[in-house]
Amino acid sequence: MWYYTQNNQQFGPVDEAKIKELVASGVVNASSMVWTAGMASWQLIGQTPLAGLVGNLPPTPPSYAAAAVADPRTKGNNDLFTWFWISLIGILLGGIGIIPAAILFMILIHKAWTAVQREGIRATPDQAVAYCFIPGWNFYWYFPAFRGLAKELNAKVDALGLPVQKISLDLVTWMIICAYGSGITFGLSLIAFIVLWIMYTNKVKNILNAIAVA
């Protein structure tokens, strides 16, 4: 299955027969970028096994920027983080963004636990997220769910030799402590929590992307 671009926008997946139809209709041409599983990055269609479909079409305009196309393997994670960040703005405007931000965060956490699953791991993705909502128990479980996840992601980085920064366990620990302390500090530690929360979520997203590409 293939992904293709049109006017710098990504479409797909479609099979090779559909690509042939798109070439015939002029939707896909020599300036189109394509990607399929196994490719390290997006390439011009003429540089792939689909080159024969556009052999007689005009050459690619030199101004086309391949970097404008999002990698489908990482786009979902990046979109989650973008909307998470946007939701946090709502928190600053009166707290209305805390619920969507928390939901988006948990979706990313679920995806991260899915990426690190192995025999003997402490929790399934569903358990890791669900236990965070059990009153009382969740005060303990945040440490395995978030700090434990950081350990698993860091181990994955080492195992695959990924070129991405690992997550500081101290960052996760202080993130949770600041969240717990917000009631005692009359909300003052909440600012530190939000900053650490953003940093942690971004690092989880970056490692997830690196795993997806690898």
Image (cartoon, rainbow, N blue to C red):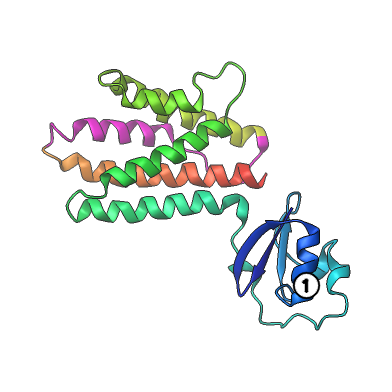
Figure check: 131 above or below 171: above
Observer able to see residue 169:
yes
Quarter of the picture containing the C terminus is top right
Q: Is residue 159 above or below residue 84?
A: above
Q: Residue furthest left?
A: 186
Q: Is residue 87 above or below residue 134?
A: below
* Rendered image quadrant of residue 2: bottom right
Is residue 181 highlighted in magenta?
yes
The amino acid type, in three-letter code, at marker 1 is: Val
Residue at the top extreme, as displayed: 120
Secondary structure at badge 1 equals: helix
Q: Residues within 10 Å of mark 1 (few under 14, many from 20)?
A: some
- Residue behind mark 1: 23
Q: Residue at x 38, y 34 (%)?
A: 172
Q: Is residue 34 magenta?
A: no
Q: Residue at x 39, y 44 (%)?
A: 104
Q: Is residue 30 visible?
A: no
Percent coordinates x, y for residue 16 in the rendering: 80, 59
Q: x, y (%) of residue 126?
A: 47, 26
**Residue that appears at 47% across and 34% down:** 110
Q: Residue at x 72, y 76 (%)?
A: 31
